[in-house]
Amino acid sequence: MLTKTPPLILEGPDNIGKTTAAQTLVKMTGWSYHHMTKPPDEWDYHHDYLARIQPERIWDRFHLGGWVYGELLQLHRTKYTQHTLKSLIAELRKLGARTILMFAHNFSWFEDHIDANPKEEMFSRENVIAANARYRSMANYRFADIIWDVSDRGFPSQRDMENWL
């Protein structure tokens, strides 16, 4: 277990509100903000993610994003198994890290609200929609500590985010 307050990890597809929520949480807590981008080819899915866990840090995408977009875009040399993912999640929980999974259960709602011009070129509209479907299916597997369906509950309020901490 980390000696300071463990990190909070926001996961979900692009355009779901992770960055906005992360920036609000940073203002509320004074913690540092980190956005996870595409890991290098030699990335060790289990070891390298665990090595980055620091207390009092807000992560805008992390291990689940690597899993979802890595599989979707075929970025990984090694095929990560569900066992690998479950093992990493167990280790993160032992360290006290909490994962918030944000997604849209209602596909029509998501397609209506998605940005027509994604910020990152490799995340086309089609890839973002496909990623949302993968995150949606993850909600059934206890891969996250808090499940947040934006299409049902709306964007989280400051009070909701305080409860995440």
Image (cartoon, rainbow, N blue to C red):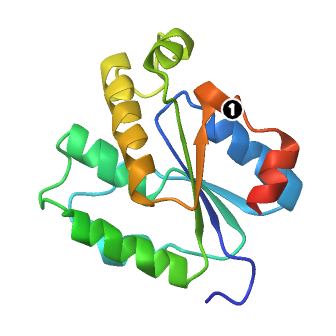
Q: In this view, does 64 lie above or below 23?
A: below
Residue holding disc 1? 153
**Percent from the top left, x then y, of residue 38?**
35, 48
Q: Can the viewer see residue 108?
A: yes
**Percent from the top left, x then y, of residue 158?**
86, 43
Q: In this view, does 50 lie above or below 30?
A: below
User: Which residue corresponds to the image point at 34% horizontal and 39% vertical from the top-left?
Assistant: 134
Query: Which quarter of the figure has residue 3?
Result: bottom right
Q: Label 1 sits on what residue type?
A: Arg
Q: Is residue 134 left or right of residue 22?
A: left
User: Which residue corresponds to the image point at 51% horizontal and 17% vertical from the top-left?
Assistant: 114
Of 128 and 144, nearer the camera is 144
**Percent from the top left, x then y, of residue 112?**
52, 9
User: Which residue corresponds to the image point at 35% horizontal and 53% vertical from the top-left?
Assistant: 66
Q: Can the viewer see residue 121?
A: no
Query: Which quarter of the figure has residue 58?
Result: bottom right
Say which element carries label 1. Answer: helix
User: Which residue corresponds to the image point at 44% horizontal and 81% vertical from the top-left?
Assistant: 91
